[in-house]
Image (cartoon, rainbow, N blue to C red):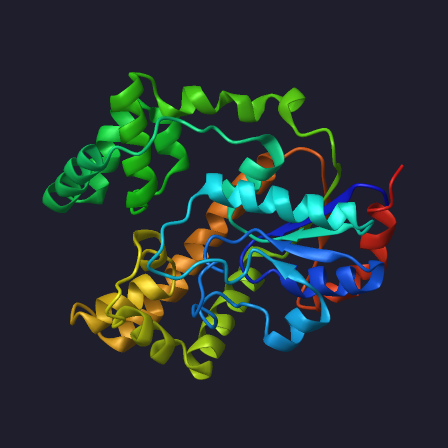
């Protein structure tokens, strides 16, 4: 399994992490997390972070990398993930990549569109307009100049709308035109022996699993964890603040939603995230798909090992 990098892909609550740990244990691999929220220290319950015992049993990379008030980007993720993968492969071990952050996986697998540097004044102006006219209207402005990007970005995803508008205003070109490199298979990184493994569950079942997971998170102390982060005097960075689970509870802490409504909103937004992941994964070529019902993802381990064998 020389230079082997096995990616376990799937929607939220599909069982990726569970299968990834079982696979890593079987083949003596180490895990690289591809999750934009697990990088933050203290955000444990709401991100379904592996326990300390699980991390002790199998080394995990890109977990607890920064504090919630620190900025973190796809470019920084790729830099750290590259270092991790090279370290693991250099010791003769395979890598299991696990996570559901589409942008981060695209950047790691296909290369990153660096784009222009962030423009704080321009971003502040875009953010001011978002507060003035609302995210849906701002999304409409993006659709007018870059319909391709707008079709990929949810109207409530202010951070990505902001970046797309920023790139357009700085370069005069839609961000989608810069990102066409992702459609070019020749740009995929050839130095690693990639295997893409996908997990699928029926949509109704997947939604039920998401709802159940949110209930378990709340029972495990999600509200208390989110309140501790929200009230930290050092503040919370924009990316951490907008993450599913924490964003909705922040509205409750600020008096704009009841606790019951906030929890219900977490379920809705988690299902919406899964839908976005499902749409993108359907377009990703080269994935070996495994169908699951309500059984544990680890039931697929033997089939995964067969499909992931080199050659």
Q: Going by the image, does 93 lie left or right of 35?
A: right
Seen in the picture, residue 77 relative to 311 is either above or below; the reply is: below
Seen in the picture, residue 249 relative to 198 is either above or below; the reply is: below
Q: Going by the image, does 12 lie left or right of 145?
A: right
Seen in the picture, residue 132 relative to 246 is either above or below; the reply is: above
Residue at point 58%, 53% (across, down)? 99
The image quarter containing residue 173 is: top left
The image quarter containing residue 294 is: bottom right
The image quarter containing residue 253 is: bottom left
Q: Going by the image, does 215 lie left or right of 62?
A: left
User: Which quadrant holds the N terminus?
Assistant: top right
Q: Residue 141 location in percent, x, y?
A: 22, 29
Looking at the image, can residue 15 be seen? no
Residue at point 63%, 23% (across, down)? 187
Residue at point 83%, 49% (across, down)? 92
Q: Residue 43 location in percent, x, y?
A: 43, 68
Q: Residue 127 location in percent, x, y?
A: 18, 42
């Amino acid at each position: 399994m020389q230079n082997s990098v096995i990616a376990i892909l799937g929607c939220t609550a599909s069982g990726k992490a569970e299968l990834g740990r079982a696979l890593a244990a079987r083949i003596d691999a180490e895990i690289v997390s591809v999750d934009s929220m697990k990088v933050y220290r203290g955000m444990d319950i709401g991100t379904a972070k592996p326990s300390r015992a699980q991390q002790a049993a199998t080394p995990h990379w890109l977990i607890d990398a920064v504090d919630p008030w620190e900025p973190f980007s796809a470019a920084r993720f790729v830099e750290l993930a590259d270092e991790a993968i090279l370290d693991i492969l250099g010791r003769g071990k395979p890598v299991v990549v696990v996570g559901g952050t589409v942008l981060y996986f695209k950047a790691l697998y296909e290369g990153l569109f660096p784009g222009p540097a962030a423009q704080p004044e321009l971003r502040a102006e875009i953010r001011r307009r978002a507060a003035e006219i609302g995210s849906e209207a701002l999304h409409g402005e993006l659709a007018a100049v870059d319909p391709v990007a707008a079709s990929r970005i949810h109207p409530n995803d202010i951070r990505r709308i902001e970046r797309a508008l920023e790139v357009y205003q700085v370069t005069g070109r839609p961000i989608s035109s810069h990102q066409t490199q992702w459609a070019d298979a020749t740009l995929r990184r050839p130095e690693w022996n990639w295997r893409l493994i996908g997990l699928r569950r029926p949509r109704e079942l997947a939604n039920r699993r998401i709802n159940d997971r949110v209930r378990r998170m709340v029972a495990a102390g999600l509200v208390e964890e989110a309140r501790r982060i929200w009230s930290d005097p050092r503040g919370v960075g924009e990316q951490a603040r907008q993450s599913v689970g924490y964003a909705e509870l922040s509205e409750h802490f600020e008096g704009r939603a009841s606790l019951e409504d906030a929890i219900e909103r977490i379920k809705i937004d988690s299902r919406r995230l899964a839908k976005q992941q499902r749409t993108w994964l359907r377009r990703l070529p080269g994935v070996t798909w495994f169908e699951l019902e309500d059984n544990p993802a680890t039931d697929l381990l033997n089939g995964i090992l067969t499909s992931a064998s080199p050659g």
